[in-house]
Amino acid sequence: MISPLGVFDSGFGGFTVLKRVLEFCGQKPCLYLADTARVPYGDRSPSEIRLIAEEVVGWLDQQDISAVLVACNTTNSLAMDVVQKVATTPVFGLIESSAEMIFEDRVGVLCTTATASSSAYKQTIQAFRPGTLVFEQACPELVPLIEAGELDSPRLRQLVFGYLKPLLSVDVKAVVLGCSHYPLIEPLLKQMLPIGVRLIDPALGLAMKLENHLNSSGKTSFRVPLDFSGTRFCVTSDPLDFSSRAKPWLGMYPEVELISLRSKACIF
Ligand code: DGL
């Protein structure tokens, strides 16, 4: 049996990474872990995020995976060293992957509060392209609304407008979706951005790097809908609820397993 790719996030956000990976690398077996007991991560302290990362990656590592795909920017920002230390397989992150996709001189990043406070995007992009002006905008209210399935409500529009405003006032030419949940509201973001401002999804960069690593050529971009039958879905709470809320994204009710991380970081 082929070892699966281990993909994790706090909730649905990692679906945006899973989909890109299946599109770019073909129908690889995947193990998707959503830490539903502790979503959202973005309001947690760096030490909580690091402890959680240790547990999540420790569990994934015991599942005979072939690589860890960090489908969570918040973990990527604050605990990439922890992930690298715990994982015994190659690790792929979103932030490093996105830096290579940027060529504009003024870039905005929409992200969680924890990611914005870490300045991880700014540091990574500027290390790759010195001189780039990077403006990070925390969007604390988006993940709970997206998790609740609210994708185009007046409330969401008002919030997105408020989060984009400071970035547009400094004339950014590209906006990075610096939280893996945000590509799920890409249609709304596209409507609200002026023509000429490019939206960048770091998941695309991650999938391309992974494709290169796997040396695979299984592009299935034209196959709609994607096939999730090779993916094992696991959560840390309420599998039935996750399955029913996942249906609009996956086009089917996935079978979902409940796993226990026996948490040191038991902060609900
Ligand atoms: N989707 C994750 C990220 O990319 C986590 C969001 C959250 O749980 O706050 O940051």
Image (cartoon, rainbow, N blue to C red):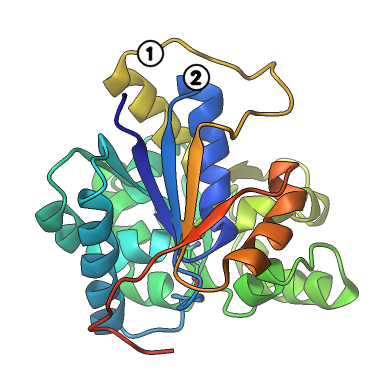
At x 27%, y 22%, the residue is 213
Q: Nearer the viewer, residue 124 or 262?
A: 262
Amino acid type, callout 2: Gly
Establish if 162 lies above or below 185. Answer: below
Instruction: Say which quarter of the image contains residue 262.
Output: bottom left
At x 83%, y 51%, the residue is 191
Amino acid type, callout 1: Ser
Q: Nearer the viewer, residue 190 or 140?
A: 140
Q: Is residue 201 visible?
A: no
Which percent across, then down, holds residue 25? 45, 21
Q: What mark, if any, has residue 26 been given in the picture? A: 2
- Asked if residue 32 lies left or right of residue 119, the reply is right
Q: Quadrant of the C terminus?
A: bottom left
Which percent across, then down, holds residue 172? 58, 54
- Asked if residue 198 lies left or right of residue 37, the reply is right
Q: Mark 2 packing: few (<14 Cα in 10 Å), some, or many (20+)?
A: some
Which percent across, then down, holds residue 173? 60, 47
Q: Quadrant of the N terminus?
A: top left
At x 42%, y 26%, the residue is 208
Circle 1/circle 2 CB separation < 8 Å: yes
